[in-house]
Image: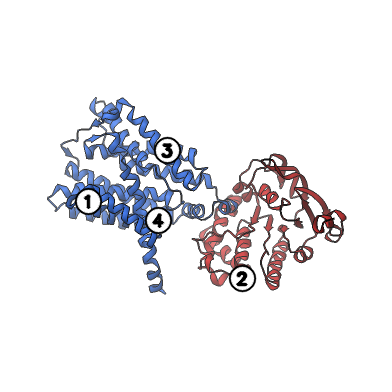
């Protein structure tokens, strides 16, 4: 299927989902749906570097938080002081741009490392970024910052429904971008990096440049996912912005769904995200993280290629 | 005729170990050069330095008139210097056709300056697969291949870069007599297309039948360079291979 047609179908599906959701009167659906959609963006973004290139990034929370803290800074600088009433799309674009630049910087510092060394370096840089934010008083430092959500939103009225719509659009964009990459020359290059970097270089693939593109794209999407967060939570502090759950979930979801294709992170995020929301409400939020851990261990042992890897052979046989 | 590849006083150390010690050689366009030497003599290090996988500490490598010192491996491949690996390194998640598509889109395509169309890339993939006799397995993964097929895939992938020089690093290791003949025939075909070939090999029968010229490395130094029949009678080469 051609990319433009796929994007069109995805956009229509997204529009249909939003139209149907308007019949739901309970705001909780939008709060929970926002989180699931946010994880679709995060896990898809993680998968561009982790799944397509094979570089496991533990720094998701930092890039996500940079997007969120860019919003906090801009909110304080422009919106609160009434210099310029910045809209959510503008905040998302700027948050994504800042995270993209930081992602590129992290890439420059870490991409000459491989395997566990790369992963540890990304984790260490995430800690460095968290420390900087924690000590930056302008954005609230360790005590956090309040962002007052506007009482109503353009187009849809309710602000939580607006945030849900914004995250739905971001989810559609991120999945469309991931699929476009997968079917492109860039996607082939990423696959060779994952399979054998030395052979890739010997075949003419500029591996470092491609890895930097991957970290930049991945960082941009993570930052875009983080930008609306302050308006969603109303209060942002480093402990919640840099929460380990973002890093763990953004790895667990593609691993459970399957890392080598765009649909893996989507399936993983929808299944695991929904399950977590359900368990958080019915049992406790602590149990939801326990479930993530158990599922992750289970999938790594039983189905290392995720659900897509389990289903694909059946599909191929069926076609044959 | 100006040499295609010129190596001048090349040295490479790994800590205190001298892997290459002032190696110089020149390869003419269209030539078939055999590079031999005992294990640990520096053959693979030399290949890695030529192709940019390792960087030499001193000396100069010139390819097609360009000083390639400091260039990355992919830049050298794009200039027209391709290699096959001692142990096959296929892209395991890609089909055979896609394995060949990579050098076509990332190397040959770049050098031409204009983009191949999708149909041209498809045709070229098919042509390369037919050349090595793997066209029936175009959609299969490398894990489905036999050892000799894997070696052929390595050579075909190197050919995908549309090289002027092909460095075949032990392309026949572990193969049977008839399989060696297959690979030799293939290398011969490639050479007849005008591609210069450096053959690194331990199988003397293959090297002797294929090479027009032989270079011998021992302990990182070049000890002989000349016609194969002369080189193997060189007392220093005999000493290196058979001992005192």
Name the residue beneath numbered marker 3.
A124
Chain coloured red here: B
Quadrant showing the C terminus of chain A: bottom left
Residue nearest the viewer, comparing A290 with A244: A290
Residues tagged by mark 1 and mark 3 found on one chain of the structure: yes
Judge whether A255 appears above or below A94 on screen. below
**Residue A111 x/y as whole percent:** 50, 43
Name the residue beneath numbered marker 2.
B133
Q: Which of the two discs, 1 and 3, sits closer to the camera? A: 3
The CA distance from mark 4 to mark 3 is: 24 Å
Q: Which of the two discs, 2 and 4, sits closer to the camera? A: 4
> Which is nearer the N-term, disc 1 or disc 3?
3
Q: Colour of chain A?
A: blue
The CA distance from mark 1 to mark 2 is: 55 Å
Q: Do tag 3 and tag 2 residues touch (Cβ < 8 Å)?
A: no
Which of the numbered marks, if any, corresponds to residue A259? 4
Residue nearest the viewer, comparing A292 with A109: A292
Q: Which of the two discs, 1 and 2, sits closer to the camera? A: 1
């Amino acid at each position: 299927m051609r990319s433009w047609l796929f994007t069109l179908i995805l956009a229509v599906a997204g529009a249909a989902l939003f139209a149907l959701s308007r019949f739901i009167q309970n705001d909780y659906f939008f709060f929970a749906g926002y989180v699931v959609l946010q994880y679709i963006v995060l896990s898809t973004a993680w998968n561009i570097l982790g799944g397509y290139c094979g570089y496991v990034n533990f720094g998701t929370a930092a890039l996500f938080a940079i997007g969120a803290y860019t919003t906090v800074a801009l909110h304080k600088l422009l919106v609160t002081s009434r210099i310029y009433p910045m809209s959510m799309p503008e905040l998302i674009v700027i948050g994504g741009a800042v995270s993209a630049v930081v992602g590129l910087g992290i890439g420059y510092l870490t991409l000459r490392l491989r395997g566990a060394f790369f992963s540890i370096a990304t984790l260490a840089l995430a800690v460095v970024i968290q420390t900087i934010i924690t000590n930056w008083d302008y954005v609230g430092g360790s005590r956090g910052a309040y962002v007052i959500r506007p009482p109503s939103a353009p187009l849809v009225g309710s602000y939580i429904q607006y945030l849900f719509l914004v995250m739905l659009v971001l989810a559609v964009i991120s999945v469309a971008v991931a699929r476009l990459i997968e079917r492109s020359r860039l996607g082939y290059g990423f696959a060779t990096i994952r399979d054998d970097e030395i052979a890739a270089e010997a075949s003419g693939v500029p591996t470092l440049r491609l890895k930097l593109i991957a970290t930049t794209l991945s960082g941009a999407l993570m930052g875009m996912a983080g930008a609306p967060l302050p308006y969603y939570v109303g209060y942002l502090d480093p402990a919640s912005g840099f929460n380990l759950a973002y890093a763990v979930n953004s790895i667990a979801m593609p691993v459970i769904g399957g890392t080598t294709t765009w649909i893996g992170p989507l399936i993983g995020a929808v299944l695991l995200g929904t399950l977590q929301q359900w368990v958080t409400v019915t049992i406790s939020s602590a149990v939801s993280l326990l479930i993530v851990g158990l599922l992750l261990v289970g999938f790594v042992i039983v189905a290392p290629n995720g659900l897509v890897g389990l289903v694909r052979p059946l599909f191929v046989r069926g076609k044959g | 005729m100006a040499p295609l590849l010129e190596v001048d006083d090349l040295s490479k150390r790994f800590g205190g170990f001298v892997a290459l010690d002032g190696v110089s050689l020149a390869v003419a366009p269209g030539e078939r050069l055999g590079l031999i030497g005992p294990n640990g003599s520096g053959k693979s290090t030399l290949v890695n330095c030529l192709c940019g996988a390792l960087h030499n500490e001193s000396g100069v490598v010139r390819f097609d008139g360009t000083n390639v010192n400091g260039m990355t491996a992919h830049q050298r491949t794009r200039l027209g210097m391709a290699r096959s690996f001692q142990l096959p390194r296929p892209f395991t998640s890609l089909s055979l056709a896609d394995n060949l598509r990579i050098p076509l889109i990332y190397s040959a395509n770049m050098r031409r300056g204009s983009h191949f169309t999708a149909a041209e890339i498809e045709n070229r993939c098919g042509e390369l697969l037919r050349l090595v006799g793997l066209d029936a397995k175009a959609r299969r993964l490398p894990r489905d291949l036999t050892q000799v097929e894997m070696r052929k895939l390595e050579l075909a992938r190197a050919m995908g870069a549309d090289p002027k020089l092909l460095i075949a690093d032990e392309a026949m290791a572990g193969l049977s007599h008839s399989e060696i003949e297959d690979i030799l025939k293939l290398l011969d075909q490639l050479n007849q297309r005008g591609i210069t070939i450096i053959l690194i090999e331990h199988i003397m029968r293959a090297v002797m039948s294929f090479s027009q010229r032989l270079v011998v490395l021992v302990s990182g130094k070049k000890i002989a360079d000349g016609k194969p029949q002369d080189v193997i009678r060189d007392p220093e080469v005999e000493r290196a291979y058979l001992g005192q």
